[in-house]
Image (cartoon, rainbow, N blue to C red):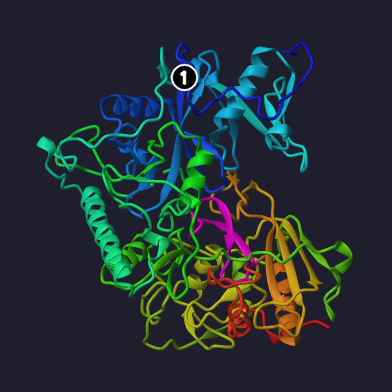
């Protein structure tokens, strides 16, 4: 049904959400949000927000166990005093915020707007976008332009779709009703400094809590205060320069505050990790089955708790690092995302314990990987010397016609009249007996007891077993010996249609400072799986495309490029499967031919310098049946 009226262009900053102190006489809907790795605030569900508000009413200094209301959030807890979400299995911490909206807005009515992702499931919009979309929908605007909010999308209410203005890709969207978010009537609480109670812990009767988090926090508090006391004594004696890592008042004092320009913010947790997930580890259990318990392990800032502090202010407070004094060694946390060789929590605690032992250590965040070169003009991109063209495209698979499984097996084997008394490594039956596939498969001209020997490697199998193996593969007219992996014929893969581009850019790779760089760009769109894929008819996703890869522009680098082009033409670079990094199924993944995707560093292991990479990738190409004999002038 057509919607009357003109379209709507959202004005920047035109949302209704607020995060600071509100007037005393208004009612507001409360939405709790967490900051993801892309800097976007993502809302918790209405059920989780009700749970957080209930805990907040009972104990403003408590800890919220998210798994009590949503099983998929079992690894996550929220510390209300520090306003951080904590993942217990990885130590990842993310800022959270408490945001207020009008009762008449989408969260107040329980309206949720969602878009369809590549896997066919539905993803909710950020709350500010949801509020703007619902406002336009209620005003009966036919469309809504989200570009002023930082998104190049046009929402069409008539077709219930969103269109990417750049790629023109269209996705479905939907509006559904859910539980309304919690409503605060009357005065909205101000930020305040939380007093320390009679007990020093969160256990009953004021005794210390014995849960794993409190044990860690209390030990860290004691170590930090001991370090500060030691540094003050050394500074008074004039023996050691005081590090501003622990400058100022006690880091874990129940009543002290952190303020001033030299606040001790070098040991600050936050950000990173989770690989884009909201919250994930092990359940957080205390000795009593309580919704929350008191924790006094967060420093206050300028005499105020962070509860209603805007997210940008909290980030500024935790990221404001003082200068590291000379002579103090840095202990890098290799990867705060958890992908490095040292667990972030272990690295952090190691630094604290080293400080407690009198060793001056300053925790620092590891440098970010340099994934891409500086911006390049199109005129600076040159063809690769000795390589024809600058791109390759693959479309639908062209199956080899007229080759039955029996024809392929006979082509690469010779019949053995007298079989040796050894096992067939396919069916694990003796070669002198019938194939294990007798009664399961039947092919004209191939009897179960017939044995064949492969031409090059001379390994022997039941011919019926080779037919069964071929039928279970890609059926591309090639055979691969299951013992030595020798390839007979031209092996092809199941890579979806896409595009490969390659050119020379005027920048150097680490370790190859005397030559320029070959850049390869792979681009594969999402689509529908065919009969050669794991789930025919089901959608597959294509994350991270276009993917940029790099080779040195020298003789061996150009040789590798030529072989990679052959591998692309044979559809061997990618396949559809389960991602080893995210666990997502039905997605495009690499297919055992490693590429260097990090341009100016090697922090992830996928960059330079790596003196063995070119030789290693030549070996991997050889395993796929692509070698010296495939090089073309």
Give the main secondary structure of the magenta stretch: loop
Quadrant location of the C terminus?
Answer: bottom right
Q: Find the residue positioned furthest to the right.
A: 379
Q: Where is 467 relative to 142, above or below? A: below
**Mark 1 surroundings within 10 Å by alpha-carbon count, few (fewer than 14), some (14 through 19), many (20 or more):** many
Whether residue 401 is visible, yes or no, is no
In front: 554, or 274?
274
Q: 145 or 327, which lies in front?
A: 327
Q: Is residue 472 above or below residue 206?
A: below
Q: Is residue 378 visible?
A: yes
Image vertical order of residue 178 relative to residue 363, above or below: above
Q: Point out the stretch of residues depicted in magenta.
A: 572-597
What residue is disc 1 on? 29
Residue lying at 62% horizontally and 79% vertically, measured from the top left: 488
Helix, strand or loop status at disc 1: strand
Choose between 332 and 571: the one closer to the eye. Answer: 332
For the N terminus, which image quadrant? Answer: top right
At which x and y percent is residue 597? 63, 67
């Amino acid at each position: 049904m057509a919607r009357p009226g003109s379209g709507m262009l959202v004005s920047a900053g035109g949302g209704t959400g607020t995060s600071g102190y509100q007037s005393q006489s208004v009612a507001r809907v409360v939405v709790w949000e967490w900051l993801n790795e892309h800097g976007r605030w993502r809302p918790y569900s209405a059920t989780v927000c009700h749970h957080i508000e209930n805990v907040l009413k009972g104990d403003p200094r408590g800890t919220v166990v998210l798994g009590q209301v949503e099983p998929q959030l079992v690894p996550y807890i929220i510390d209300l005093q520090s306003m951080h979400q904590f993942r217990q299995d990885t130590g990842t911490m993310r800022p959270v915020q408490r945001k207020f909206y009008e009762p008449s807005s989408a969260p107040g009515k329980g309206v949720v707007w969602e878009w369809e992702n590549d896997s066919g499931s539905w993803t909710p919009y950020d709350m500010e976008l949801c509020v703007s979309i619902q406002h336009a929908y209620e005003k009966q605007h036919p469309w809504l332009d989200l570009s002023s909010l930082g998104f190049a999308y046009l929402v069409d209410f008539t077709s219930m779709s969103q269109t990417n203005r750049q790629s023109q890709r269209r996705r479905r969207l939907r509006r559904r009703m859910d539980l309304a978010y919690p409503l605060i009537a009357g005065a909205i609480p101000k930020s305040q400094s939380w007093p320390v109670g009679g007990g020093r812990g969160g256990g009953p009767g004021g005794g210390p809590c014995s849960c794993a988090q409190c044990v860690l926090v209390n030990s860290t508090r004691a170590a930090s205060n001991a370090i500060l006391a030691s540094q003050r004594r050394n500074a008074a004696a004039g023996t050691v320069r005081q590090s501003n890592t622990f400058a100022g008042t006690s880091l874990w004092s129940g009543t002290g505050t952190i303020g001033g320009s030299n606040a001790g913010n070098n040991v600050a947790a936050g950000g990173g990790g989770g690989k884009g997930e909201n919250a994930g580890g092990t359940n957080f259990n205390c000795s009593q089955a309580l919704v929350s318990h008191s924790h006094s392990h967060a420093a206050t800032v300028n005499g105020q708790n962070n509860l209603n502090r805007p997210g940008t202010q909290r980030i500024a407070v935790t990221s404001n690092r003082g200068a590291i004094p000379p002579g103090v060694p840095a202990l890098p946390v290799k990867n705060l995302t958890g992908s490095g060789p040292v667990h972030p929590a272990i690295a952090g605690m190691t630094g604290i314990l080293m400080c407690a032992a009198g060793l001056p250590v300053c925790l620092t965040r590891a440098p970010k990987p340099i994934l891409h070169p500086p911006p390049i003009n199109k005129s600076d991109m040159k063809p690769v010397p000795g390589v024809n063209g600058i791109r390759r495209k693959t479309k639908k698979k062209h199956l080899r016609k007229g080759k039955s499984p029996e024809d392929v097996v006979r082509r690469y084997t010779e019949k053995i009249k007298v079989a040796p008394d050894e096992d067939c490594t396919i069916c694990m039956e003796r070669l002198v007996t019938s194939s294990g596939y007798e009664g399961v498969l039947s092919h004209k001209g191939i009897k179960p007891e017939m044995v064949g020997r492969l031409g090059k490697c001379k390994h022997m199998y039941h011919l019926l077993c080779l037919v069964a193996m071929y039928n279970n593969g890609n059926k591309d007219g090639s055979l691969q010996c299951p013992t030595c992996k020798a390839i007979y014929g031209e092996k092809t893969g199941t890579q979806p249609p896409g595009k490969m581009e390659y050119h020379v850019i005027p920048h150097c790779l680490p370790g190859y400072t005397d030559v320029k760089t070959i850049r390869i760009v792979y681009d594969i769109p999402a689509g529908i799986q065919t009969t050669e894929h794991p789930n025919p008819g089901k959608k597959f996703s294509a994350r991270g495309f276009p993917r940029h890869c790099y080779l040195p522009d020298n003789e061996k680098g150009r040789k590798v490029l030529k072989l990679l082009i052959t591998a692309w033409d044979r559809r061997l670079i990618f396949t559809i499967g389960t991602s080893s990094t995210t666990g997502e199924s039905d997605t495009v993944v690499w297919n055992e031919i490693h590429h260097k995707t990090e341009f100016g560093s090697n922090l992830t292991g996928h960059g330079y310098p790596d003196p063995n990479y070119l030789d290693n990738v030549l070996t991997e190409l050889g395993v796929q049946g692509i070698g010296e004999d495939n090089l073309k002038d």
